[in-house]
Amino acid sequence: MNSLSKESASWLEIGPEADGQRVDNYLARLLKGVPKSHVYRMLRSGEVRVNSGRVGPERRLKTGDRVRVPPVRLATRATATVRTPIRPRVHVPVLYEDEAVLAVDKPSGLAVHGGSGLSHGLIEQLRHERPAAPFLELVHRLDRDTSGVLLLAKKRSALVGLHAQMREGRARKYYMALVDGRWAERRRRVELPLHKYLLANGERRVKVADEGLEAITVFRLLQQFPGASLLEAELKTGRTHQIRVHLAHLGFPIAGDDKYGDSARNKAWARLGLKRMFLHARRLIVAHPASGQQLVLEASLPDELITFLKHFEVPLAATL
C-alpha cells in the first residue's frame, strides 16, 4: 500500500506556484486518487491544518504557509494508473510558451480534461508529458469538438491574473464557424441570455431563456457560399456553448454540431467530408500576466476544414 506518510502526518510548505489556491483544490491535486469527499472530511475534522490552525475548504493559501497533511492511503491511485494510462498520445502543437503561460492548438475530438466517462483529456496528457512541472492549469475551456487556441497557466499567480481578464471581459476571443444558411448582415451583435439545464440522461444542455445569464456574441460575415456562410464570432462573455446556442437559436446552426445542429443537414455535411463540428478558436488576445504586454495567440484553420471548404470551389485567401 502506498501512502503519503506511513506513520505520521506531513508538513508541507507552500511555494509560489500554489499562492492564492484554495486549500481543498490544493489537497485534491496533491492527493490524486483520493475522493474529494474524503478531502472535505479531513478538513472538517481538523486533520488538515494551516499554520497549526483549523481551516475551511475555502481558505486560500499563501507562499510560506505550512500545511499539515494526515497520512492517506493511496492504493486506488496505483490501480487507477494501471487501468487508465495516458494513451494514446495526441499531438498537440505548442503555439507559445514561457515561464508563466503555455498556449496550444487543441485538435478537435480531444476533451480538455477527463471526466464523464473519459479517463483523461488534454490537461492530463500535458501534465503527464511534463512530470517536473510544479503547476499547470487550464485558463479557459473549449468544447471537445472545437479546435484552436487553448491557454494554460504554469503559475498560480498567472492563473489568477488571466482568470480576472476573462471574468472582466478584457480577454478577446475570436472563433470561425461555418453555418447553415445565408447570413446577410456584415456585422451583428447578439445579446441573448443563456440558461444551462440537464436532459433526462444527465447530459448538459444550454438554451436561450429570460432567466439565463447575460451572453453577448458579435458575429461578422467572412464569406458566403451556396447554402452556407463562414462567420467570425467574437465572444464578449464566456458562457457554456455560447456560440453554438446563439447561432442555432437564430436559425443558423453550425455545420456538424451534433447537439444543437440539424441532424439531416449534418448527414449531408458528412457525405461531403465534414467529420467534425466546424468551429475553431482562431485568436486569443490577452495581457501577459507577468509583463502586461499584449499577447496575440493564433491558430490557423485546420487542414481538414480548409480542405472541406474547397467543396465550394471559391478562393479562400481573402477569408483565411
Image (cartoon, rainbow, N blue to C red):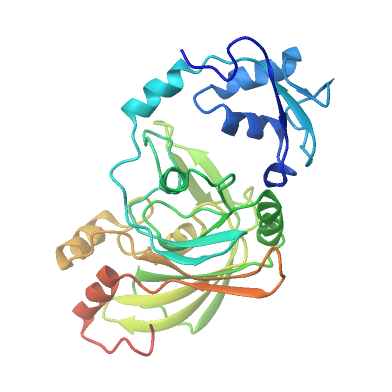
Which residue: 59% across, 46% down? 135
Pick the residue in front: 253 or 297.
Answer: 297
In the displayed structure, 36 sits above or below 137; it is: above
Location of residue 271 with respect to 136 vertically, above or below = below
- How many labels were placed on the picture? 0
Q: Is residue 35 above or below residue 293?
A: above
Q: Quadrant of residue 29?
A: top right
Closest to the observer, 13 or 266: 13
Q: Residue at x 37, y 58 (%)?
A: 92
Q: Is residue 46 left or right of residue 222?
A: right
Residue farthest to the top, as pictured = 7
Please tell me whether residue 167 is drawn above or below residue 117 in the rendered image: below
The x and y percentages for residue 140 are 56, 54
At which x and y percent is residue 192?
58, 60
What is the x, y in percent for residue 212? 62, 49
Q: Residue at x 44, y 49 (%)?
A: 126
Q: In which image quadrant can residue 268 be found?
A: bottom left
Q: Residue furthest left?
A: 271
On screen, residue 28 versus residue 250, left or right, reads: right
- The answer to which of 246 and 89 lies nearer the viewer is 89
Q: Is residue 249 left or right of residue 82?
A: right
Give the percent coordinates (x, y) of residue 47: 72, 15
Residue closest to the eye, 123 or 130: 130
